[in-house]
Amino acid sequence: MYRSGPLQLRGELHDADLERYARHVYDRKMSKTFVPRPLRSPARIMGFVVGAAATLSLVFSLVPAEPPLAQLVSRLLVAVWILIAVLLFLLGIMLVWTPRLMAKQPGILVEREIVVDEEGFRSRSAQLDVLHPWSSILELDEIDTHYFVFVGPSVAHIVPKRFFASPEASRSFGEALRAGMAGASASAEPSAR
């Protein structure tokens, strides 16, 4: 249960914060897939796929084939290269254009005030005032430079650690959020029975 007084901080998000958020969401999704950890980077994935396709292209171009098989192989290679182009396009949208589009939304790259109190997590700006009760906060992710307060599967409030005056203030913010979330889940458990 959240028991301390309200915590308040102010700051403004930058483009780099949105890019870090897009990268974090991508990493979260990739961690739930079968892709081995060394291949989770978009550049490594595309390098692996392009390398495999280039190798197949070379092998099939060196192997003499009967006309029907040659047509099948050439169509297969065209399909692989089209798939690679589509994957590159989708990765580009996810990692490059999503943060840019988010930045153009009113109320994103503006000064905001964040308040953590007994009601929950509140984010205020000149354009928006949003309160998320403790029960609606799904998860708190902390990385070296940011907190991400998830209120949906891929929807989070971005709280850069540069907003805090000291590392201790950042730690107490994380502890306050975790305490509020724990209190909400503890109070929800008895009513579920």
Image (spheres, rainbow, N blue to C red):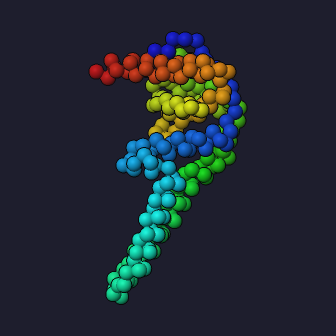
Which image quarter: residue 148?
top right
Closest to the observer, 27 or 63: 63
Evaluate whether residue 119 shows in this view: no
Q: Position of residue 155 (x, y in %)?
A: 52, 39
Q: Is residue 38 above or below residue 121?
A: below
Closest to the observer, 143 or 150: 143
Q: Quadrant of the C terminus?
A: top left
Closest to the observer, 166 or 153: 166
**What residue is shown at x 35% (from left), y 84% (from top)?**
65
Drawn side of residue 86 relative to residue 114, left or right = left
Q: Residue furthest bottom?
A: 67
**What residue is shown at x 46% (from left), y 59% (from top)?**
48
Evaluate whether residue 97 shows in this view: yes
Which image quarter: residue 162?
top right
**What residue is shown at x 54% (from left), y 32% (from top)?**
143
Q: Position of residue 64 (x, y in %)?
A: 36, 84
Drawn side of residue 70 relative to residue 163, left or right = left
Q: Residue furthest left?
A: 193
**What residue is shown at x 39% (from left), y 77% (from top)?**
60
Q: Position of residue 104 (x, y in %)?
A: 68, 46
Q: How many marks?
A: 0
Q: Position of residue 125 (x, y in %)?
A: 68, 31
